[in-house]
Image: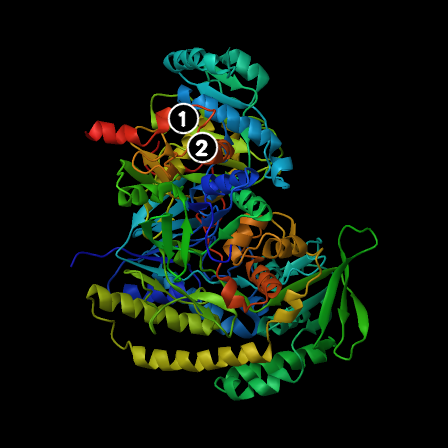
Amino acid sequence: MAQPRVTIVGAGPAGTRAAELLVAAGLHPLLVDEAADNGGQIYRRQPAGFRRPPAALYGTEAGRATALHASFDALRGRIEHWPESLAWNLRDGVLHVLRGERSHALPFDALILATGATDRLIPLPGWTLPGVFTLGGAQIALKAQACAIGRRVAFLGSGPLLYLVAAQYAKAGAEVAAVLDTAPAGARWRALPLMAARPALLAKGAALLARLRRAGVPVHRGVTPLRLCPDASGARLGGIAFRQADGREAVLDCDASGLGWHLRAETQLAGLAGCGFDFDRASRQWLPRIDADGRSEVPGLYMAGDGVRLLGADGAEIAGRLAALAVLRDLGFAPPAGADPAALRRRRQAMDRFRRGLAIAFPWPAQLVAGLPDETLVCRCEAITAGELRRSAGALDAPEVNRAKAFSRVGMGRCQGRMCGLAGAEILAAARGVPVEEVGRLRGQAPVKPLPVAALREEEA
Amino acid sequence: MSDNRADVLVLGGGLMGAATAFFLRRRGLSVILLERGLVGQQASGVNFGNVRRQGRFPPQLPLANRSRALWGQLPELLGEDIEFLPSGHLRVAYTDEAAGMMEAYREAARPYGLKLEVLSGNAVRARFPWLSAEVRAGSWSAEDGHANPRLAAPAFARAARRAGARIEENTEVLAIEREAAGWRLDAADGRAFRAPVLQVSAGAWGGRLAAQLGEPVPIVVRGPQMGVTEPVPYALTPVLGVTATVVGEVIYLRQVTRGNIVFGGVGHGPADLDTCRARVEPAITLRQFIQLRRMVPALGALRIIRTWSGIEGYMHDEIPVMGPSARWPDLFYAFGFCGAGFQLGPGVGDVMAELIAAGRSTTPIEPFHIARFAAKAA
């Protein structure tokens, strides 16, 4: 058959491995990515002219990062790479991509979405103070710019990234005020049977903790964050007020903090394409419905990586390969020599066990979110408080998130709920007295991210 | 009321149905409103939010005037703010031909009491300096404005409920039956609702119901193509529109006081009555950008953050169906408002309640009678 049009969105681990496999099978895919170069968020490359060695940038992940970058460099010229390009809409078998000032309508025979994830956040009182970052943001400052987010940095949240970023900061020479983990100390032991599926990762986690201990970083488990406090000027972060596991309240002095509770999948393109979604209990979020290889219910649409199943970078590499093999099979192409989808699926299964273990070891504190004080700013784009959201649930009788959005504007702003949506759903569900899955999924609208009014149609001069 | 009987059943909980229920209660009639989903979820909730009279088919102006008077009283009537802002409404023309159409419309509207000021390009730019050099003329309607469509119909329904109406959401009606004592509506959940009088105010779905009741009408469904920019300082005070001979040049926009600029126009997208979904055509969004920049060049520096659509019913003659049935004395219609019903909503509710309760309307609505289609078919 003629060369099919295969497009990949996202040049992280999943997108890169998918492209590599498609090229090995003789195809010439188009790879669209928002970043200036490949690597995704996890293996983000430093800007041209920056010369920090990989070990300094990626720490324990340096080997994987350099391997992925080398694979990508080998693909240059054999794929069409559109960096700094925004896939802003997807419908009826056409992907709409803003590249420079021009929007391109790109029909495809197969499309692999490898859109990754962002930090899952809790809109704590004071979270909009300057100095408050996400964990991912704090890590990117380090990886992309070799900068720390502050002089004395605290990390608050739960999940492996919390410890990884804290250890990376400590290694880079930043003062780490403390790690505040909302997970109770005992939770990790309950998760051990599932997490034993990936012993190497367990060992890596233990090594991170040891490094933090050697660096003298206090680690508090089972904390309840109360608020992010301003400094004396009132203009930026000065500390974090929290309740310790033993019930005592304390304020940790810091001038910057990184926040995050695992990740949330970037699913807007899947939603715009009309994919079905299921509520995933482990991650307490709605994820696109796919088969074992990443096929969605929409013909020609495939998904891989953290944008569809939150398995981390290694899992994303496997998922990217599986999705590419599914594309080849569905388009009638022979897989490249040595491809073994059954083995890939088995490895991913172990990762999925580990993922479920992580959700037990580092649980999302739904009760904390549901109980945020009324005056807390939930939606920072539209400046809407938890109290206003509760009013839409109560007096205005909104039974689900899209109705609450229509009334309260939570999720209606620039980020369309990417930052506040999951927390907003917990608040709404608690106010309605129903499980969070019953208040539904926030429907995204195009554009996936803000689109300039100056954008031109491709045929315009 | 527990026996699911009332004086009036209202089928369809958009703005028209919710407003009718509210005004029926003010006239002392008992009413049950049946809505398949949630009140104001379809066209009533997703439209542009124009409270505009200028540009309407002139015989519709008495109804629009009555509605405009009600808009000014809504905060008191409903006990809620639905963000009505009588900011003024400006239409611009890019050609002398379009400027001539404006002057002709100003004369046609005058007998109905709508005062319009047609200004030259320079005069309109002196007032609104952000308009582009391409604007040749402007037509200014001082008392028109805009409001928040997401809030309007639900606010009417809540006020109606507080006044004693029954608002039954998530109640899909499967069958309309004629009984000796009036009408019976059978809901999907097994309940039957009865009343001597029925109003069909089911928006884009009104055509199917009218056909079922023996009065087919020519209606098509389309989706408005809406978008909104990021918030910027409040500067574009009037609602803006275009008078043109080509629909592709017609953009409309308004800035809300919190800063976002809502826009629509240039074309329509497809809409589906069965899936209840309508989507924005990406190509139309990009064509809207051209017209936004053409009218207010500074908009080229902004970004849009969201687009949306909905399901609207358009009659072939661009005139709504409103008034009594031609077949049944106890059946009334208010649907098919052709993408221009939002401003009319309060007036339609008031007039329909008057028509049902008093047997006549003090505002002329003959041009909207459903019989006009039967006459053409015959």
Q: Which residue is mark 1?
A: B365
The chain that hosts pointer 2 is: B
**Number of numbered markers:** 2
Classify the position of the C terminus of chain B by image quarter.
top left
The chain that hosts pointer 1 is: B
- Quote the CA–CA distance across marks 2 and 1: 10 Å
Kind of element beneath mark 2: helix
Position in image of residue B36 (x %, y %): 41, 53
Residue type at mark 2 is Leu
Q: Nearer the viewer, mark 2 or mark 1?
A: 2
Residue B90 as seen in the image, left or right of residue B208: right
Residues at badges 2 and 1 in contact (C-beta under 8 Å)?
Answer: yes
The residue most toward the right is A232
Kind of element beneath mark 1: loop
Q: How is the image coloured?
A: rainbow
Residue A66 as seen in the image, left or right of residue B213: right
Position in image of residue A362 (x %, y %): 60, 76
Position in image of residue B196 (x %, y %): 41, 45
Kindly identify the residue that appears in the image at 50 percent across and 65 percent down: A438
Q: Which residue is mark 2?
A: B355
Q: Nearer the viewer, residue A214 or A408?
A: A408
Q: Residues within 10 Å of mark 1 (few under 14, many from 20)?
A: some
Q: Which of the two labelled residues, at mark 2 and mark 1, occupies the earlier sequence position?
A: 2
Q: Residue A156 falls in which quadrant of the image?
A: bottom right
Residue type at mark 1 is Ile
Kindly identify the residue that appears in the image at 52 percent across and 18 percent down: B140
Residue A376 against residue B282 in the figure, above or below = below
